[in-house]
Amino acid sequence: MSLIPVSEALERILDGINVHGGEMVPLIDALERISANDIQARRTQPPFEASAMDGYAVCSSDFPDGADLPISLRLVGESAAGHPFGGKMGAGETVRIFTGAIVPEGANAILIQENADAQGAKILARELVAAGRYIRKRGLDFSKGDTLIERGTKLRPRHLSLAAAMNHAEVNVVARPRVGILATGDELVPPGQEPGPGQIISSNNIGLQGFVDRLGGTAIDLGIAADTEQSLAASIEAAQSANLDILVTIGGASVGDHDLVLGALESGGMELGFWKIAMRPGKPLMFGQMGSMRVLGLPGNPVSAMVCAEIFLRPLIHTMLGRSAERIEETAILEKDLPENDQRQDYLRARITGTKDGLDIVTAFTRQDSSMLGNLARADCLILRPPFCPATEAGDRVKILRLDDT
């Protein structure tokens, strides 16, 4: 099977995906979830004319232009938040008022307390007050029926606060895609255990579970399958029983004698879409479908697995959530020369080291081995180099993909 371009691979992976349905969740559990529909206000805010300051509710007719100061007013009551003044103000009267309280009937302005002197039941106003001063009009923020949060919004803390103010105790959010993570290989042991001869710590599954959860999916750890047909078959059967939307396998999809994953998946009913792409790192990427479950076979090298997740798993999850699958490619300035590229699309781990002319300056790590997680952890972007890209000199502009954005 020949190598296919990254763009074609991504198109095949995303073809025919439907956005997940919604589910109602308590508002407090909706953080970072995606709104499944427009959210409308169930009330008007504020629901009444309210004071924006501590002071005294007054009527502007008691403050004619050119009047001598101070102006004497008679204190007739108090209006506090949750405890409104029950009467009606008349001419020459005032009501002590606090921020957020209902403006009494008969008042149309607020005299702030800094500009008033209290003398028992008499208040002396030391400024002229115009109608509407320091009053929040009913519906200033929003009115009942207003659409304030649109479908597809990623709900941040500010959105939850708004939804609560609109009187929503729960909201409809897009159901999380269920993503199974299956590591494979006799050489792998879980973190915290002592590796035997020739063994290493399994790290890809840990990173990918965090990656999935951060994007808004639900990661399901399927453990580590041994390099036997029996172990792989049992793990694949467990994946099929777990009601997954996506199965991600790690390793075992190359061409060695011990690379059994592709055969095990096909034996389990997977229809192979493609295998091997013109990409570095990540050439052995595999994609197929097993019923409604999509299968991504990632390379076993740690950097390859994580970069492939950035390029393919991210847009797959985003599409299921109804978000845009398109990644923003930013322009940056290269700090050091890069040689010409071959037929594979290259994703170089790099760091942003400064700015110039409003653009980031980026430096690719000298060593780009796909086993080096240390470099990947230090990277904050990937330099994107298309196939057959000519040699690039320091100062030239390149395209980058930022890491860690959601």
Image (spheres, grey):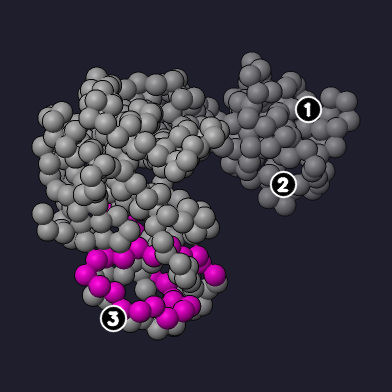
Q: Name the spot of residue 112 as percent of width and height, x first.
A: 73, 40
Name above or below for residue 211 compared with residue 358. above
Q: Residue at x 59, y 31 (%)?
A: 50
Q: Nearer the viewer, residue 381 or 331?
A: 381
Q: Is residue 292 magenta?
A: no
Q: Nearer the viewer, mark 2 or mark 3?
A: 3
Mark 1 residue type: Arg
Which residue is labeled 3 in the image?
390
In which quadrant is the N terminus drawn? bottom left
Q: Quadrant of residue 205?
A: top left
Q: Which mark is residue 389?
A: none
Kindly give the residue lying farthest to the front in the view shown: 197
Number of other residues with Cα within 10 Å of mark 2, as a class: few under 14, some 14 to 19, many 20 or more: some
Mark 3 residue type: Pro
Number of other residues with Cα within 10 Å of mark 3, as a class: few under 14, some 14 to 19, many 20 or more: few
Q: Name the spot of residue 167 as percent of width and height, x first.
A: 45, 23
Q: Residue at x 26, y 31 (%)?
A: 228
Q: CA distance from mark 2 to mark 3?
A: 74 Å
Residue 323 visible in the shown view: no
Q: CA distance from mark 1 to mark 2?
A: 16 Å
Q: Which residues are magenta?
A: 325-353
Q: Nearer the viewer, mark 1 or mark 3?
A: 3
Which residue is labeled 2 in the image?
128
Q: Residue at x 49, y 59 (%)?
A: 375
Mark 1 or mark 3: which comes first in sequence? 1
Q: Is residue 345 magenta?
A: yes
